[in-house]
Amino acid sequence: MLLVTAVGELPAGRKAGTASPQTAIGNRQSVMADLIITIDGPAASGKSTAARLLANKLGASFLDTGAMYRAVTLAAMRAGVDLNDEQKLLDVIQKHEFQFSDRSGKMAVCIDGSDVTEVIRGPEVTANARYIAAAPKVRERLVQMQRRFAAGRRKIVTEGRDQGTVAFHDADIKFYLTADLAERAKRRQAELQAKITAGSLDQIQKAIEQRDKSDEDRATGPLKPAEDAIVVDTTNLSIEQVVEKLAKYVREKCSKKT
Ligand code: DC
C-alpha cells in the first residue's frame, strides 16, 4: 500500500489522497492543485535541492518522486524478489505500507512504519532503482500516487524524470535542469564525500553516465524535456542562483497563483 502525507498545505475540506486516480488524471480543474511546478532532469543536475528550496520559497509542498522508486527498490531487495519480475514488484507494493511525507520541506520515507529516509540513498539501492524504473505497471502506480499527492495540495513542486512529460502534462510551469556530466560527477562526489562513501571522480562519472543512459532509453517515462519545458543549464550556477532563476520564471508566468 502506498500512502502520501504532508505537513500543512491541505486546503480546507480536502483530504490527502482522496481523489480517485481517474479523476486526478482526467480533470485538472476539479481535483488538481492550484499551482503545479515540475522539475525534471538527469542525476546530480541539482533538481532535488532546487525543488526543495523553491518549494520552501513558495510555501508549496515538495515531492521527490525518486524517493518513491528508491523505496520500492529497497523493499524488493529486502524481499529478495527478482527485480526484473514486474508482478513480484507489484506484489511488494501491495504487501508493504510505504509512507512518503513532506517533513519540513524534506521527503521522509517509511516502509511498514520504519524510517528508511537515509537507507534508500545507499549505493546498492541507487544502482538497482533502474529495474524498478523500467517496470511500466510500477511506474503507472507511482504516477497515480503522485497525482493523488498533488490533488490534496494547493501548491506543489514535484521533481523526477517524467513529471512534466507523463505525470503532470498540464503543469503551470515545467523546468528541465541539466548540467555537464563532469560537473554533475563533481557535485555527486562532494555529496558522497560528506557521507564518506565517495569513489573516484572517474567511477562516479561512469555511474552517472550509466544512469543517464538507462533513464533515457527506457520505453516508459523516459528522461527527456517536455516540449514546453524551460531548460536550465546549471553547470556554472550555484544552487542559490538556480533557485532564483526558477523563482523568477515562476513569478513571471504564475504571478496570480503565487
Ligand atoms: O532522482 P533519484 O536519483 O532519487 O531517482 C532514483 C531512481 O528513480 C533513478 O533510477 C531514476 C528513477 N526515477 C524515475 O524513473 N522517475 C522519476 N520520476 C523519478 C526517479
Image (tube, rainbow, N blue to C red):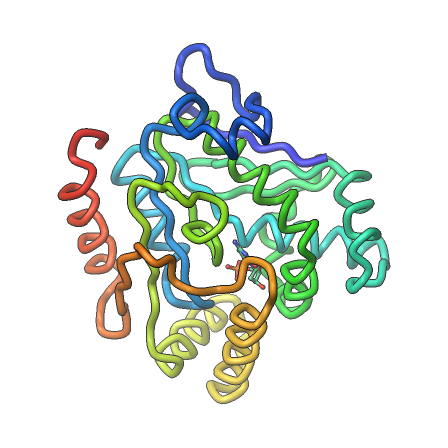
- At a point 47% along the width and 28% down the height, the residue shown is 151
Displayed-image quarter of ligand 1: bottom right
Where in the figure is residue 213, as x and y percent of width and height? 54, 76
Residue that protrudes farthest toward the bottom in the picture: 202
- At a point 17% along the width and 29% down the height, the residue shown is 256
Instruction: Give the quadrant of the C terminus.
Output: top left
Residue that protrudes farthest toward the front in the picture: 26
Side of 92 where 209 appears, left or right = left
Number of marks drawn: 0
- At a point 18% along the width and 49% down the height, the residue shown is 249
Where in the figure is residue 36, as x and y percent of width and height? 35, 38
Q: Is residue 189 above or below residue 67?
A: below
Q: Is residue 20 above or below residue 138?
A: above
The answer to which image quadrant residue 130 occupies is: bottom right
The answer to which image quadrant residue 60 occupies is: top left
Side of 247 where 10 appears, left or right = right
Where in the figure is residue 10, as x and y percent of width and height? 43, 21
Which is more toward the observer, 167 or 197? 167
Which is more toward the observer, 252 or 238? 252
Where in the figure is residue 214, as x and y percent of width and height? 58, 72
- At a point 50% along the width and 32% down the height, the residue shown is 26
Instruction: Give the quadrant of the N terminus.
Output: top right
Q: Is residue 205 above or below residue 53?
A: below
The answer to which image quadrant residue 185 occupies is: bottom left
Residue that protrudes farthest toward the top in the picture: 13
